[in-house]
Amino acid sequence: MSADASNRNVALVGPGGAGKTTLLESLLFVTGAIGRKGRVMDKNTVGDASPEARERQMSTEVNVAGTSHGNIRFTLLDCPGSVEFVQEARAALMGVDLAVVVVEPVLERMIAVAPLLHFLDEHDIPHMVFINKMDRSEVRYRDLLDGIRRVSARPVVPHQYAIGRGEELLGYVDLVTEQAYAYRKDGPSDRIPLPEEYREREQEARRMMLETLADFDDDLLEKLLEDQEPPTEQILRDLQKTLGADQVVPVFMGAAEQDMGVRRFLEALVQETPEPAARAAALGIAGDGPPLVQVLKTYFVPHAGKLSLVRVWRGSVKDGMTLDDMRIGGVVRLMGAQHEPAGETGAGSIVGLARLEEARTGAVLGSSGEAAQIRCAAPAPPMYAFAVTPANRSDEVKLSSAFAKLVDEDPGLRVESDPEMRQTLLWGQGEMHLRVALDRLRNKYNAAVEASSPKTPYRETIRKASQAHGRHKKQSGGHGQFGDVKIEIRPLDRGQGFQFENRIVGGAVPRQFIPAVEGGARDFLQKGPLGFPVVDVAVTLTDGQFHSVDSNELSFKMATALALKEGLPKCAPVLLEPVLSVTISVPADYTSKALQLISTRRGQILGYEGKDGWSEWDEIRASIPQAEMHDLIVTLRSMTQGTGFFEWSYDRLQEVPERLAQAIAENHGSTAG
């Protein structure tokens, strides 16, 4: 089945607080999908229906709603704006025909859009910008356009030019038709004469728009060179074509809370949003073949089970059919928290499929050959963790199942078991991300947990060599226990681990007991004099004694432990900490602050340079102790308008400064006690 040309799938994305949910509410209201607008602060919007979202008055997961206008059915995905929920937005964007980037008219906050725009360009996703809250703007419109240009790798093409600003915002000039309109809060805009003082600005903005489009249309270029006025139809055709190819970024404006500019924006969505077939073709998906769907989001719905939000790329899906050996338990259309049975739907739709138990977010179901070719959003690297324990020990089994569902719903989360530190780590994108996850565990899965900062896996080693003697002798009737060893202990180069050598000659320790000496050493080194595992140490067995009756493996293990207990403190033990290799990405304006942040975290700056493919961004390479990393992302985002991010990997162990090492050892001892 070919894609339904009447469908359009649009994602609303952008920084937190820009008004995406309010824009969704306005679009639904002016198209008649809802009879009364809700407000985020009143906790009654179609989107943000979860308790976690309403409590925080912000989107915490993708919300879906549908409406129709001008014979076009829109499926609208309202994506979280907080960078901590970036994985939700990225996964959803992979299945839409168009992304609408909603921004506020604040120049300082434009930089927050840069990572999102880079992702859209990287995946060739057509996108336009809607400048919201124009009734509160204190910035000249042309400065706002310049602000968007600075963070966009694609040419910015304004459709409109503002008349007035802030409380004196009157309306706009349509740069395609050169008609001026005045906003009305309770209805469509009124057509008005173009104010003379705006004529020169309008003509300059229009000239720039046409010249940008002419870069992609030789016929339009020829008309401009000959001073011919291009027809409106040609301009609209070029706008649609270049938008669909992700060559330009059209810009619209308005105030969604007042429904101002929303109707004109809606008309543009009808006229310019690429058809579903165009997006499928751009991804190389053949029009003929078996059904092919991609999972954009996973929900667990109370009393209904698992629901997979999917984009149908090809074919049709219906109740009861099988996809990759999974039977579809139902096809539904989503309207916020409400679900409407659809029975069957065709290519180009975004719908919910019930009970696809093995389907995961990002998975492509259907033809296996094509599934491998369809791009999925790469998982965002984890940047923040909590150590979590069940609030009630009897919930441990329940918690395991809840964790699985939690990660299934939100692939930006990761659960990791750390047996050495005896902790379960819940990883995510930031503290708020994890707090929402903990609330969801409690509210949705009735599995409350307690959270704390993760423990750092310290190690210890030695600085010098020594010799030691250990004798274990026990007599209690019958066979006793006897083992006697003499050992040498010496440090190894960093990273060499543990080495054991046997230099016994003449049978002072029988061959069958040598492995027990090595095993005893390994066991004892799990906790050294400072209380941590000992690494980079060599133990050499040089001499010993045995008893023909009383000696056994346990005796020699015990003797070795006694020798190490005596010898290790003489070897100048020193505390080691794991150091991570960290690559921090920030806008160039914040590079100096990021360098200072690294220094305050006992980090070593290795260098920095321009970030490849990112205009006016820097990439800083550094080594930072793991103990200093826990809330690094929180501070980094705070100082970079929420834009900074990093990647990390384990690098090495290094000595802890002596004063700090003493405090760590004392604290570890009191905790262990």
Image (cartoon, rainbow, N blue to C red):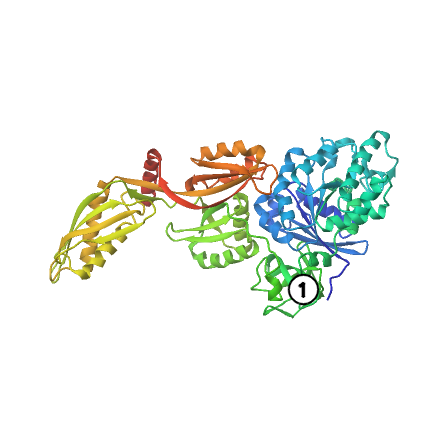
> Which residue is most to the right?
193
Asked whether residue 429 is in view, the answer is yes
Asked whether residue 37 is in view, the answer is no
Number of numbered discs: 1
State the image coordinates of residue 358 (x, y, percent, origin top left).
Answer: 56, 64
Q: Residues within 10 Å of mark 1 (few under 14, many from 20)?
A: many
Quadrant (top left/top right/bottom left/bottom right) for the N terminus: bottom right
Q: Is residue 663 left or right of residue 97?
A: left
Inspect the image, locate mark 1, and give the three-letter code of the amino acid beneath it.
Val
Q: Is residue 199 left or right of residue 273?
A: right
Q: Residue at x 74, y 48 (%)?
A: 242
Q: Is residue 498 left or right of residue 386?
A: left
Quadrant (top left/top right/bottom left/bottom right) for the C terminus: top left
Question: Which image quadrant for residue 577?
Answer: top left
Foreground residue among 128 and 588: 588
State the image coordinates of residue 191 (x, y, percent, origin top left).
Answer: 87, 39
State the image coordinates of residue 138 (x, y, percent, origin top left).
Answer: 71, 30
State the image coordinates of residue 295 (x, y, percent, origin top left).
Answer: 62, 59
Residue picked out by circle 1: 331
Foreground residue among 149 and 88: 149
Q: Residue at x 34, y 47 (%)?
A: 495
User: What is the secondary structure assignment of the residue under circle 1?
Assistant: strand
